Amino acid sequence: MYLEATHMRRVVHVGPTMAPGGMSSVIQLLASNPPEGWRSSSCNTFSTKGIRRKMKRWRIAKKQIKNGDFDLVHIHSASDWSYRRKLSIAKVAKAPVIFHIHSGKFDIDTKSELDDYQVVCLSEGWSEKLRHLIGDSISVPNPVDAQLNEGVERECFTLLMGRNDPVKGHAFAYSLGLEDLRVTGVEQAPEGVTALGWVTEEEKWRLLQTAGCLIVPSDYEGQPMVILEALAAGCPVIASTNVPDLPECVKSISLDDIEGWKNAISNPIIHGLEDAVAKHHIDIVTKQWGEIYDNIIDSKTSTE
């Protein structure tokens, strides 16, 4: 039997809770769906308003974790400066730390720096790929909590969802010359392309339920939330070969193969989409995290 709410274990999620993108979506989902016997909060490390505001936000977060009363600190990290900032926060934490790597471009040799923490990757494939850099790790998939509406009919437009960043492939998508391309993350686009800007959660799910297919022509990715969400919404997906660990129902095409992209968009895989992401359901992923959290705390208690 679990303890009363006033004595529940406390986990804090540390990362870019206020930023656009997949990592923020994961943090929000996990913080809103804590495992049984746990209560969760979040600590934002990110600002969109320039380097000085970003550094201020990082210092505030570091102070919050140093002075906070938590049973577990769950840190969400990308690569480069994201990793360096998060590592500095991990070092001041008084509670055990989970270091959760989301980046699809992690290239830092960190084995000695992460020895004291439980390192988590997005898949077994990523754990193996990064082993020479991060040492041993465990894997937990990203969660999905589909917010679908009844009676929505699918249309014929092609959709690209991603922040306004060259690695997301907006320029490549424009070069395909598609008849009805709609893109998020940008306010302006070439003639014939519909720029949707940054969309709300409700708008995102409506787009995924109505798009003919989603394209992900990225230069690199970790485990894109938008692919998991699209499949959960029954939306076919075509992705670049730079995106790893794709389900078999996702067509994977090289960015050098323009005709291959056009053909795949005309003939996407439409079967087995929802089944491909069953393991990502929020309830299943939450249970996995609960087992990990409990094991860390129980192990700490047994050695005290």
Image (cartoon, rainbow, N blue to C red):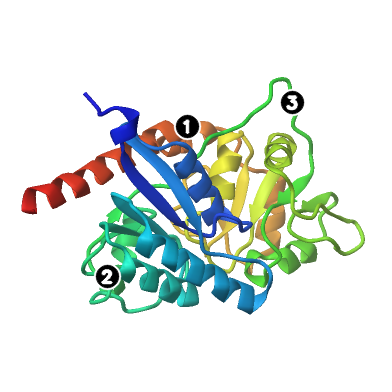
Q: Residues within 10 Å of mark 3 (few under 14, many from 20)?
A: few
Residue marked by disc 1: 275
Tell whether 276 sits left or right of 192. Answer: left
Tell whether 60 sits left or right of 18. Answer: left
Please state which of residues 193 and 163 is positioned toward the viewer in this rendering.
Answer: 163
- Give how far apart the Cα atoms at labels 2 and 1 are: 35 Å
Residue for point 24% across, 69% down: 135
Mark in front: 2 vs 3: 2
110 versus 102 height, above or below: below
Residue 6 x, y percent position in the rendering: 33, 33
SS for dot 2: loop
- Give how far apart the Cα atoms at labels 1 and 3 are: 20 Å
Residue 33 x, y percent position in the rendering: 45, 36
Residue 114 - label: 2
- Give how far apart the Cα atoms at labels 2 and 3 are: 47 Å
167 versus 237 height, above or below: below
SS for dot 3: loop
Q: Residues within 10 Å of mark 1 (few under 14, many from 20)?
A: some
Does the rendering let one see residue 77?
Answer: no
Q: Are marks 2 and 1 in contact (CB under 8 Å)?
A: no
Please state which of residues 162 and 237 is positioned toward the viewer in this rendering.
Answer: 162
Mark in front: 2 vs 1: 2
Residue for point 70% across, 49% down: 265
Q: Amino acid at mark 2?
A: Leu
